[in-house]
Image (cartoon, rainbow, N blue to C red):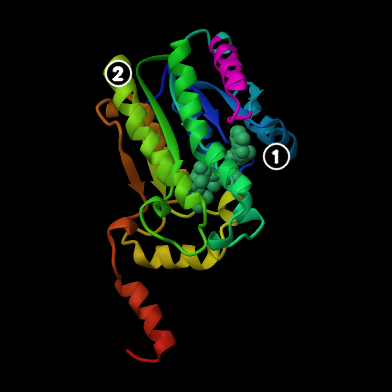
Amino acid sequence: MSYNLLKGKKGIIFGALNEDSLAWKIAEKSYEEGATFTLTNTLSAIRFGTIDKLAKKCNTIVIPTDATKTNEIEELFKKSMIFLDGKIDFILHSIGMSLNVRKKKNYADLNYNFFQKTLDISALSFHKVLQTAKKLDAINEWGSVLALSYIAAQRTLHAYNDMADAKSLLESIARSFGYIYGREKKIRINTISQSPTKTTAGGGVKGINALMDFTERMSPLGNATSEECANYCVTLFSDLTRKVTMQNLFHDGGFSNMGMSYNAMKQYNKSLNCD
Ligand SMILES: NC(=O)c1ccc[n+]([C@@H]2O[C@H](COP(=O)([O-])OP(=O)(O)OC[C@H]3O[C@@H](n4cnc5c(N)ncnc54)[C@H](O)[C@@H]3O)[C@@H](O)[C@H]2O)c1
């Protein structure tokens, strides 16, 4: 069911690789709610993935951009504003990658070139998008910018590796830039901390099945799905949440405030052979 929450809104959506991507679901939902937007990803992700199919479905174009390169981000904004015939109302940053995770490097034995890439791709790119937008004055007043984060920014989760540091930085950038952009242009900036979800990036996290089972048992409402994440994002792009800014918003079925649940204890007891 559509509520037309984003009728007339124009956006840019980073990070749809394939149908599993969180950004894919968020694009579909935004389109359903009446938004127009451009899609973007790296050239290699566009070739490797299926973003063209999404573009067709959402009646839009794909503009290749490496989100670590400010000149490419500038081009993206300029082309998007031409295609959309006006300034931007919402942006989704749904980008994450760690070569240390991919190459199975241990956190106590990191490759520092990889580490810098992790921070650049997964966190600094958010600052680059915001700084470029501000310099071009590309976002309308009361616009909304969202990035996707994970609870490893606050709590240590086995094997999340240098992505935990990237997420901490990402959330900090949302606060620091949120202050400046809010004060000067009434633009809001938030991060959504999503439950673990089976996607290409999510699948790269060591032990994702065990992790998802654990968080499902621990969360009173269960894990949040990617469709539910899309619904939440739409409310934050909409005018119904105009005074929400500089926040990290947990979208995790309650997991972040749990210590131990009945369902998790039951499972634990099985392995201890007691009631
Ligand atoms: N899947 C999960 O469990 C989960 C949970 C919480 C948060 N997140 C976050 O959600 C976001 C989206 O991840 P996803 O799970 O949908 O996986 P995904 O693999 O579908 O998306 C990651 C995207 O980042 C893009 N990307 C990588 N390098 C880039 C660059 N230099 N420039 C532009 N784009 C680049 C990839 O091409 C890909 O589209 C990430 O920030 C991820 O950390 C995921």
Q: Position of residue 245 (x, y in %)?
A: 29, 31
Q: Magenta stretch containing residue 79, yes or no?
A: yes
Can you name the residue that lies furthest to the left here?
243
Q: CA distance from mark 2 to mark 1?
A: 36 Å
Image quarter for ligand 1 equals top right
Residue on which disc 1 sits: 49
- The magenta stretch is 66-81
The quarter of the image holding the C terminus is bottom left
- Residue at 34% x, 77% y is 265
User: Dot 1: what SS?
Assistant: loop
| Quarter location, residue 271 | bottom left
- Residue at 60% x, 26% y is 69
- Residue at 36% x, 53% y is 154
Seen in the image, is 96 located left or right of residue 174? right
Looking at this view, is 161 or 270 the one in front?
A: 161
Q: Magenta stretch containing residue 89, yes or no?
A: no
